[in-house]
């Protein structure tokens, strides 16, 4: 356990345990040998009466409507407030959610789900399969501005026609209150995995229609169906969840309250953790990671199916020139960023898809080309490409606008990139930053040149990454468009043989990287701190943090 001394009288210690979030500690901590996996489950005898967890997040999400947002900052809330047809365990493997079973048709075009009996919303009203139909039809209204609308339009019959023109019949049936049937455009073996993503979480018609886009702003109107429900919201400060007594498996939920606090400064958050003020933190100062790895068994580094990259506005000169984009890619010393900024807590990314998806024992990235993106860069080749594009030694190249969202770690990374572009290519860089909500609105509106971004997988398949650069996709905010690439992505989406689909997806990614439409930087593990007394929580390889099985122990 992390070093922490409490030199207090026994009486004071007993008093403080009722008000401190932390669980106490020892003066010397064993090395974090097993800290790459979540804590083991507690026995009933170990349970403490204080079943409240305080967890720190660095960024406030821009919204908590599961049908609308694609913001990963919202995931700790949505994944604990809602439950979809399916879920994932600590290994990222598919498990039943509010559907107790399902079966596909022989041709892979129909999926039938059987809901658990007597499901209820958090307000105690009955939950039926028809709630899903309402949710999907709402997502398909353009005014909903659903960021993951393609999860429906690319797969479910009639969804695209409804979204584009308002007419058509949605390929979703409800034979009875406990049965939901999907009719797909094409067989997609990973379709069930997609259903664990929050865009497929149900929302309650009554609360949404009565409150429209305000329903997520107050606890009394925020109705959910997961293990927890909203009890309190303090804008810019915290959101408090409490156990949902109407959850189908409520008797197994041990935690009574979760307080998500916002602390932007990572050093302040770490101090709060080490003092016992909070039970967990999501963002850790890079400079402290080596110490925490060596000293603390409360530090966790969890492999993640994710890629950090920088967007390039492909529609704006001079970034519409592939040679310019390639030059920028080759001018970056990624290994230096990883060693000096990230303290080694990442591996070099030279393409889009993260390691972690395998077929027949072969990972997607095995044998993949580096596309000329070397760990330490290739400055001479970068200079040559920039000269060929008409900007020898950066002469005549307009000042680059390099944007990022407000975050201390990202700030250091951006400053390092700016220095590399100036030193290696002679490009002057102007850095700008904004709070996430404003920043992301500007990026979506293409009001940027080069901008910090990244993508954590929504489900365990490379297809979660590839549509990011597909023409017309709601999450394509680079401006990149290539019909040949689009065709390969669509081909892979319809392939039922996993090995063949992986081959097609690899071809698509290779074609994408020929155009260098973005700046892949690294694949990073998810780091967090959690008090040793908190057991049963888990974060899977998708970066999804869940407290449904969590418990505080003595």
Image: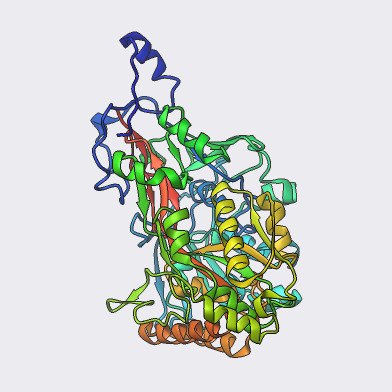
The quadrant the N terminus occupies is: top left
- Residue 437's place in the image compared with 151, above or below, is above
The reply, left or right, for residue 537 in relation to residue 241 is left
Front residue (pair 287, 544): 287
For this rendering, which residue is in front, 309 or 58?
309
How many numbered marks are there? 0
Tell me if residue 175 can be seen: yes
x 63%, y 37%: residue: 219
Quadrant including the C terminus = top left
Q: Residue at x 65, y 83 (%)?
A: 387
State the residue at coordinates (44%, 67%).
Answer: 193
Q: How far from the left and from the top, in percent, is residue 145?
A: 71, 63
- Which picture quadrant has residue 369? bottom left
Q: Position of residue 11 (x, y in %)?
A: 34, 9
Q: Is residue 114 something that shows in the picture?
A: no
Q: Position of residue 482 (x, y in %)?
A: 63, 86
Query: Residue 146 is drawn in which quadrant?
Result: bottom right
**Left or right, residue 383 beside residue 551:** right
Asked which colour scheme the image uses, the reply is rainbow
Which of the two residues, 82 or 384, is positioned nearer the viewer here? 384
């Amino acid at each position: 356990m992390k070093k922490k001394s409490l030199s207090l009288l026994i009486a004071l210690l007993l008093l403080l345990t009722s008000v401190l979030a932390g669980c106490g500690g020892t003066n010397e901590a064993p090395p974090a040998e097993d800290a790459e996996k979540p804590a083991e489950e507690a026995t009933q005898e170990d349970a403490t009466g204080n079943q409240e967890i305080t967890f720190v997040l660095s960024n406030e999400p821009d919204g908590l409507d599961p049908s609308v947002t694609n913001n990963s900052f919202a995931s700790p809330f949505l994944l604990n407030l809602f439950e979809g047809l399916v879920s994932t365990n600590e290994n990222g493997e598919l498990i039943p959610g509010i559907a107790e079973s399902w079966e596909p048709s022989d041709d892979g075009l129909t999926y039938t789900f059987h809901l658990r009996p007597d499901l209820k919303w958090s307000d105690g009203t009955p939950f039926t399969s028809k709630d899903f139909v309402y949710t999907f039809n709402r997502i398909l209204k353009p005014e909903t501005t659903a960021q993951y609308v393609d999860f429906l339009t690319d797969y479910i019959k009639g969804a695209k026609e409804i979204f584009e023109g308002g007419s058509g019949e949605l390929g979703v049936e409800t034979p009875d209150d406990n049965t939901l049937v999907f009719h797909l455009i094409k067989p997609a073996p990973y379709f069930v995995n997609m259903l664990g993503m929050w865009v497929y979480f149900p929302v309650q018609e009554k609360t949404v229609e009565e409150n429209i886009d305000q329903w997520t702003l107050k606890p009394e109107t925020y109705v959910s169906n997961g293990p927890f429900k909203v009890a309190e919201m303090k804008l810019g400060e915290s959101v408090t969840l409490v156990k949902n007594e109407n959850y189908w498996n409520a008797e197994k939920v041990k935690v009574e309250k979760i307080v998500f606090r916002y602390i932007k400064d990572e050093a302040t958050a770490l101090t709060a953790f080490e003092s016992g003020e909070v039970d967990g933190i999501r963002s850790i100062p890079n400079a402290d990671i080596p110490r925490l790895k060596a000293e603390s068994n409360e530090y966790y580094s969890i492999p993640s199916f994710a890629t950090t990259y920088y967007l390039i506005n492909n529609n704006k000169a001079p970034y519409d020139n592939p040679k310019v984009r390639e030059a920028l890619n080759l001018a970056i010393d990624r290994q230096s960023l990883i060693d000096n900024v990230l303290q080694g807590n990442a591996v070099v990314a030279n393409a889009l898809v993260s390691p972690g998806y395998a077929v027949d024992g072969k990972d997607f990235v095995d044998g993949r080309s580096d596309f000329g993106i070397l760990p330490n860069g290739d400055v001479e080749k970068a200079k040559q490409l920039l000269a060929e594009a008409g900007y020898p030694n950066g002469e005549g190249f307009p000042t680059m606008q390099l944007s990022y969202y407000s975050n201390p770690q990202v700030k250091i990374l951006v400053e390092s990139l700016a220095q590399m572009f100036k030193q290696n290519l002679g490009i002057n860089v102007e850095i700008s930053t904004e709070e996430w909500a404003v920043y992301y609105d500007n990026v979506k509106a293409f009001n940027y040149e080069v901008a910090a971004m990244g993508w954590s997988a929504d489900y365990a398949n490379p297809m979660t990454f590839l549509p990011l650069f597909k023409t017309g996709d709601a999450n394509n905010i680079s401006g990149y468009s290539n019909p040949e690439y689009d065709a390969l992505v669509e081909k892979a989406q319809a392939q039922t043989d996993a090995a063949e689909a992986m081959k097609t997806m690899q071809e698509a990614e290779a074609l994408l990287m020929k155009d260098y439409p973005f700046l892949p930087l690294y694949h990073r593990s998810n780091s967090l701190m959690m008090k040793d007394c908190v057991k049963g929580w888990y974060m899977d390889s998708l970066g999804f943090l869940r407290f449904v099985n969590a418990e505080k122990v003595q």
